[in-house]
Image (tube, helix red, strand yellow):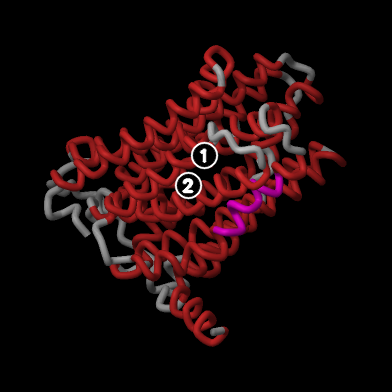
Amino acid sequence: MLTQTVSLYRNAYGGLSRSTWWLALVMLINRSGTMVVPFMTIYMTQHIGVSISKAGFVMSLFGSGAVIGALIGGRLTDRLGSYYIQITTLVGGGIMFIVLGQMRTYVSICICTFLLAFINEAFRPANSVAVAHYSKEENRTRSYSLNRLAINLGWAVGGGLGGLIASYNYELLFWVDGLTNLSGAVLLYFVLAPSRNVATEVKIKKEKIAGKTAYQDSNYMIFIFLLFLFAMCFFQLFTTIPVFYKEQFHLTIFFIGMVMTLNGLIISLFEMITIFKLEGRRPLLHFISLGVVLVGIAYLMLNAPVSNKEALAIIIMLLFTFGEILSMPFMNSYFISRTLPHNRGQYAALFTVAWASAQAIGPFIGGLIAENYGYDILWFGVAGVCVLIALLYRLLHKKNDIHSLT
């Protein structure tokens, strides 16, 4: 049994290119330093001394910068290549984190926050394109899963370290965040620079190539809209649900934290082997719709009349996590399946914008519904939206052309 398990994990992680592994390591370093954003509101209110509404406006600026940065980053990726955009944004983001930590006036913080988000999010489309570039069609979903693993581990490390550093010195938080960005850029240069790695693209495309843009791809635009709706639902997991667990389930902060940690732990242990078993067996939208349904069921169970709330919270997190495992890696593969090498950045930009916009809007809408209509209505509503999204993904699968069916 042990031998079979070891073999399964070896096969799941095997066959990926060395460049894919290097790229995941760069992402791990980069995300391990993502410490400032989760503590930005506390920093603004407690250390800069502004109101919660002004702190909220700063975070809105961060969201706006992220959306614009993703759109421009995707376009530049198509023109210049993913490597050049990644290393530029890592260096620029590292510098901006350090600069932001030195700002003391509200206006200067607003300007620097917008610029930081603009540069930081321009990295994401380029990184998504790079994953596709270094992978093969038969292992593309696993390559994205490896990148997701690096992101999840990085967030876990960054969140923990960020709390410790912030309790000691907030300004140090900005320095550490900036230096990890710069460290990621240094590693990227040494392992994936075109002069050091033959797998890295070096061609800068200046000619205009005929073909559909992402905006002319109606199936993809439908997919992006449904992704935006799903992401707004999904982000309730990390914003509204913890408050619900505290207020309605009367769970301890420690237990809520442990339940949230369970998400990253399961993804780290099981996502790669799950994708290894499923990749290529059914159309991508089949797995996506199934994952979205599981997330919907998880939200529905929040209203279940069960006395053992601790056990219910664990079961709900298991449903959330396996819904995430089934849906998100295949979402990456779906958008790549519709691209050509010269327009991948544009497709990746819209993909990034959908997530960034949902992260900014979803928690706010969820909070409004909970406050004005109650949690029961919120969870029934979110579950219903998830089921509807899953049905629409199934319909999208039926109308897909041969280019998108992989």
Query: Is 258 covered by the magenta stretch?
Result: yes
Q: Is residue 81 visible?
A: no
Q: Is residue 316 visible?
A: yes
Q: Relative to 56, does residue 146 appear above or below in the rendering?
A: below
Query: Is residue 260 or residue 41 the one in the foreground?
Result: 260
Quarter of the figure with residue 3: bottom right
The quarter of the image holding the C terminus is: bottom left
Query: Is 27 covered by the magenta stretch?
Result: no
User: Which mark, residue 123?
Assistant: 2
Query: x%, y% of residue 378?
Result: 49, 24
Q: Are marks 2 and 1 in contact (CB under 8 Å)?
A: yes
Q: Secondary structure at mark 2?
A: helix
Q: Amino acid at mark 1?
A: Ile
User: Which mark, residue 202?
Assistant: none
Q: Which residue is the extreme one toward the bottom?
A: 3
Task: Classify residue 204 as left or right of residue 88.
Answer: left
Residue that appears at 42% across and 73% down? 16
Say which residue label 1 marks.
Answer: 119
Query: Is residue 153 or residue 208 the one in the foreground?
Result: 153
Residue that appears at 43% across and 57% down? 83
Query: x%, y% of residue 258?
Result: 70, 49
Q: Which residues are magenta?
A: 257-266
Task: Classify residue 361 as left or right of residue 50.
Answer: left
Mark 1 closeness class: few <14, some 14–19, many ≥20 residues within 10 Å: many
Residue that appears at 30% across and 70% down? 138
Alpha-carbon span between mark 2 and mark 1: 7 Å
Query: x%, y% of residue 57?
Result: 60, 18
